[in-house]
Each structure stands twice: as C-alpha cells, then as structure tokens.
C-alpha cells in the first residue's frame, strides 16, 4: 500500500502531469495523398496561366520533399484557394503522379498527356 501511495503522490495529488507535447498545425506531418492534392492544385494553376512551367516544376519538387503541413502550405501560399468542386477537372483517367513526372521530365509529353486525358474525360 505504501508503494501505491507514493505513486499517487508523484502523479496525481501534486497536480503534476507528464508533459504532453503540443504540436502546431504547421508541424503536422503530411501524407502522400496530401502531397498529390497540392501537386494537382499546382497543375491547375499552371493550366490557367498562374504559373510558368519552370515555376510548376520547382514547386512540384518542393511538394514531394515537404514533410510538414507548413512546408506544404508554403508552396502554394501565393495562389488562390483550393480548386472548387464546380471548377473544370481533368478526366477520370489521369494518373496525377505520372502527369507530374512527365511535366518535370518531358514537359511536351506531359502537356499532351494532360490534354488527351481532359479530352477523354469530356466524352463520357
């Protein structure tokens, strides 16, 4: 019983609780899906003329290196908010990772892939 009383005194009655780390939202780690969403958003801004191809390539590289929400948010902080649900979207057959790779490695091929995918999505 003495042992339990000492345990209670150490953690309960003294008001001292073990420290729980507080993490800011900007420090939360991001997933591959989060990165893919931001890369797709950057592609949209490129398609409507807000970004040049070199800017897109640089930002996409930063997106895939980002580890935290703050790093990811910083990549598109100067662009308008997320693409709205009613905004034009690419066809359902677009592999966003492939598109990003193509745009970074072979921009003309990426553009052709994106245009063909959009055209295919409008037919069905």
Image (cartoon, helix red, strand yellow):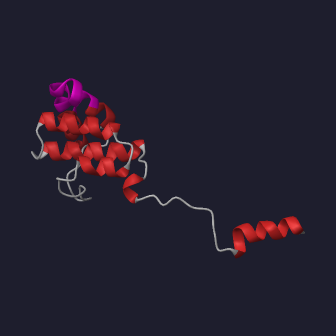
Q: Main secondary structure of the magenta part?
A: helix
* Percent position of residue 14, x then y: 68, 74
* Percent position of residue 40, x then y: 27, 44
Region in magenta: 101-113
Asked if residue 4 is positioned above or below residue 118 in the image, the reply reads below
**Residue 73 appearing in the image:** yes
Asked if residue 106 is positioned above or below residue 31 in the image, the reply reads above
**Residue 95 appearing in the image:** no
Along the line of sight, the residue nearer the viewer: 26 or 120: 26
Please tell me which residue is depicted at 24% across the width and 59% down the height of the picture: 84
Please tell me which residue is depicted at 28% across the width and 29% down the height of the picture: 101
Q: Is residue 103 magenta?
A: yes
Please tell me which residue is depicted at 21% across the width and 30% down the height of the picture: 103
* Percent position of residue 49, x then y: 9, 45
Asked if residue 39 is positioned above or below residue 107 in the image, the reply reads below
In this picture, residue 33 sits left or right of residue 102: right
Q: Is residue 36 magenta?
A: no
């Amino acid at each position: 019983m003495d042992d339990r009383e000492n345990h209670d005194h150490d953690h309960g009655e003294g008001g001292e609780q073990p420290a729980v780390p507080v993490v800011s939202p900007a420090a939360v780690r991001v997933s591959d899906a989060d990165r893919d969403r931001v890369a797709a958003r950057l592609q949209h801004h490129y398609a409507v003329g807000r970004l040049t191809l070199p800017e897109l390539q640089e930002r996409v590289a930063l997106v895939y290196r980002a580890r935290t929400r703050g790093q990811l948010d910083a990549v598109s902080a100067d662009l308008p908010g997320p693409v709205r649900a009613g905004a034009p979207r690419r066809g359902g057959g677009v592999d966003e990772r492939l598109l990003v790779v193509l745009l970074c490695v072979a921009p003309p091929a990426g553009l052709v892939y994106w245009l063909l995918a959009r055209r295919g999505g409008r037919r069905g």
